[in-house]
Image (cartoon, rainbow, N blue to C red):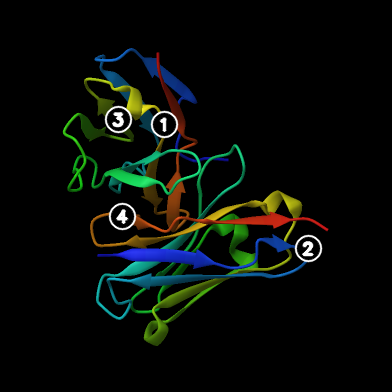
């Protein structure tokens, strides 16, 4: 059974760096074909894909946010970490991590973690 | 700004058939499979359709997907009140080298 859980601060100040952790079970990111993505949803707005890391450490980023994002994995801990620099109030959103397999972009999702950017 | 285009809203009455469309480009839907997600606000999105027309285990066969050229569609047959949710399409874009979402369609069951 695949499960994912996001964790991180609920509140960050403008200009700070946000660090989110996705802790998962039911699969290994060292297995060929596995990957994990981060997605966010600002209040009242659409889903937005942020980044993906593959089993072989290939990384992909949303082009419009690429300079602010870093995704990494710790296979031994079953964790994927996303950092987003220079946070702004417009970055206020619910952040999700999701498992992606060979047949779909997002087949299992975490419950999401709400992040508010405010001074 | 979403690179996949969806109508912001759709509606139907119980029992009706509703179609939600998703328009992309040659570098997205035209070249890559489409997923559809169902999202109830405040909960985790749920995969409804993958690889254009495949249903994950547990998804009722009232939900079906198709793709033609640079567009994709989600059809909900026998609409039920519990289908009232937001629906998103998603696809890989070769030019952006990443996944793109549609803007979402809010389905209302009248």
B101 vs A118, left or right, is left
Question: Contact (CB < 8 A) between labels 4 and 3?
Answer: no
Q: Nearer the viewer, mark 4 or mark 1?
A: 1
- Residue drawn where x is 29% and y is 22% of the image: B80
Inter-mark Cα distance, 4 to 1? 18 Å
- Residue drawn where x is 27% and y is 71% of the image: A26
> Is label 2 in a helix, a strand or a loop?
loop
Mark 2 Cα shell of 10 Å, populated few (<14), some (14-19), many (≥20): some
Task: Say which chain tag 4 marks.
Answer: A
Report which quarter residue B94 is drawn in: bottom left
Q: Which residue is mark 3?
A: B73
Q: Quadrant of the C terminus of chain B?
A: top left
Residue A100's place in the image compared with A41, above or below, is: below
Q: Which residue is mark 4?
A: A107
> Is label 3 in a helix, a strand or a loop?
strand
- Residue drawn where x is 67% and y is 53% of the image: A91
Q: Nearer the viewer, mark 3 or mark 2?
A: 2
Residue A79's place in the image compared with B36, above or below, is: below
Mark identifier at residue A42: none
Q: Which residue is mark 2?
A: A13
Q: Whole-percent x and y of residue B3?
A: 49, 41
Q: Nearer the viewer, mark 4 or mark 3?
A: 4
Question: Contact (CB < 8 A) between labels 3 and 2?
Answer: no
- In this rendering, the count of numbered labels is 4
């Amino acid at each position: 059974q695949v499960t994912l859980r996001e964790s991180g601060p609920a509140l960050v100040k403008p200009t700070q760096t946000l660090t989110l952790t996705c802790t998962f079970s039911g699969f290994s990111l060292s297995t060929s074909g596995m990957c994990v993505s981060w997605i966010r949803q600002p209040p009242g707005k659409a889903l937005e894909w942020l980044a993906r890391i593959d089993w072989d450490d290939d990384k992909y980023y949303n082009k419009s946010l690429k300079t602010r994002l870093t995704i990494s994995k710790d296979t031994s801990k079953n964790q994927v970490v996303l950092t987003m620099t220079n946070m702004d109030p417009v970055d206020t959103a619910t952040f999700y991590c999701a498992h992606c397999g060979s047949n779909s972009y997002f087949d299992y999702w975490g419950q999401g973690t709400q992040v508010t950017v405010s001074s | 700004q979403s690179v996949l285009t969806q109508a912001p809203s759709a509606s139907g009455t119980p029992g009706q058939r509703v179609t939600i469309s998703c328009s992309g480009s040659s570098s997205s839907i035209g070249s890559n499979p489409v997923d559809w997600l169902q999202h109830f606000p405040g909960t985790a999105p749920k995969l409804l359709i993958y690889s254009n027309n495949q249903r994950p285990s547990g998804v009722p066969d009232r939900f079906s997907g198709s793709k033609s050229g640079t567009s994709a569609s989600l059809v909900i047959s026998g609409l039920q009140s519990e289908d009232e949710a937001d629906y998103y399409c998603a696809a890989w874009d070769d030019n952006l080298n990443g996944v793109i979402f549609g803007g979402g369609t809010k389905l209302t069951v009248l």
